[in-house]
């Protein structure tokens, strides 16, 4: 097991900010069961696929690193042994043309491991990691609406320069729900993963995705959107359902207060 020097520089002392495409912290046990501790920019699905790809190495080795290219991405992983053979996995990804400073990332990983192994709270570690790792924000999002299949609005955020839209968010939610119901009937009830892309609304486009009876609607400025906006739209689907589905969406009783914190996630990915 790794021994951490108590005098080692703490995670809070790290002043360097890393610009990456994505970053995550996960745990895996000897049975191969893994849990995501924190993620930013990678997405839950991709994180799990990468861990599954290298699962044998992660389980059998006490500690180490993995460097590999997957498509147009570079993946760099540090892993450290904890109690009972459990491993802490710190993962960084970026585009192949962007050079990673592996030495600096390794020392960041050691600080993360030391902090998690100490009495630092989970909330504080996530807060510090959010500040240390930056991801490029997507531009062009005018508004986002997350809606129950029946039209009940869980969450919305609209650009402050669009007050008319913000003042009519419940009516917009009902309109979007009606579009999806019609489309679902039209394609004979194929609800799972249903999406309508690039619905032209004049100067903006409407993108609709549904999963687990939740509708995700994005209104995009077609002249200002950046290339990462579609990837982030999918990440929002994953993160919202992972955070809220079993605890608040399934068996929803009308309390909207838990969804308010999701604005922090939206602001992490989009300029709006």
Image (cartoon, grey):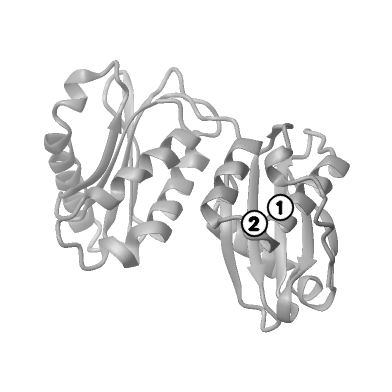
Q: Which residue is mark 1?
A: 112
As helix, strand or loop, the secondary structure at mark 2 comes to strand
Vertical position of residue 96 compared to residue 162: above or below: below
In the image shown, does 37 or 72 lie closer to the viewer? Answer: 37
* Mark 1 touches mark 2? (CB < 8 Å): yes
| Residue 118 locus on image (x, y percent) | 68, 60
Confirm whether residue 76 shows in the render.
Answer: no
Q: Residue at x 29, y 15 (%)?
A: 161
Mark 2 lies on residue: 25
Cα distance in 3D space between marks 1 and 2: 9 Å
Is residue 145 found left or right of 112 in the rendered image?
left
Give the mark nearest the N terminus, 1 or 2: 2
x and y percentages locating residue 72 in the rendered image: 73, 43
In the rendered structure, find residue 63 and report the number of the disc placed on it. Answer: none
Residue at 83% from the left image edge and 49% from the top image edge: 106
SS category of the residue bearing label 1: helix
The front one of 43 and 69 is 43
Q: Residues within 10 Å of mark 2 (few under 14, many from 20)?
A: many
Residue 238, image quadrant: bottom left
Where the N terminus falls, by quadrant? bottom right
Q: Quadrant of the C terminus?
A: top left
Residue at 78% x, 39% y is 96
């Amino acid at each position: 097991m790794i021994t951490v020097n108590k005098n080692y520089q703490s995670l809070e002392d790290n002043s360097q900010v890393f610009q990456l495409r994505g970053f995550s912290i996960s745990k895996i046990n000897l049975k191969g069961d893994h849990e995501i501790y924190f993620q930013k920019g990678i997405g839950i699905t991709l994180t799990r696929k990468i861990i599954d790809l290298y699962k044998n190495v992660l389980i059998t080795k006490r500690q180490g690193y993995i460097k590999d290219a997957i498509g147009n991405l570079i993946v760099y992983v540090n892993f450290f042994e904890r109690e009972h053979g459990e491993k802490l996995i710190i993962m960084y990804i970026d585009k192949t043309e962007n050079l990673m400073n592996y030495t600096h990332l390794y020392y960041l990983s050691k600080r993360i491991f030391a902090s998690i192994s100490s009495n630092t709270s989970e909330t504080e570690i996530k807060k510090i990691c959010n500040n240390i790792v930056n991801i490029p924000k997507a531009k062009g999002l005018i508004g986002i609406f997350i809606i129950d299949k029946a039209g009940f609005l869980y969450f919305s955020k609209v650009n402050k320069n669009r007050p008319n839209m913000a003042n009519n968010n419940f009516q917009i939610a009902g309109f979007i729900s009606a579009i999806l119901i019609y489309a679902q009937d039209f394609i004979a009830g194929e609800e799972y993963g249903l999406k309508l892309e690039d619905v032209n609304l004049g100067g903006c486009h409407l993108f609709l995705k549904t999963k687990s009876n939740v509708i995700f609607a994005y209104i995009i400025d077609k002249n200002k959107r950046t290339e990462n906006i579609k990837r982030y739209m999918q990440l929002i689907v994953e993160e919202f359902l992972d955070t809220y589905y079993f605890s608040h969406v399934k068996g929803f009783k009308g309390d909207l207060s838990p969804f308010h914190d999701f604005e922090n996630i939206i602001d992490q990915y989009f300029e709006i």
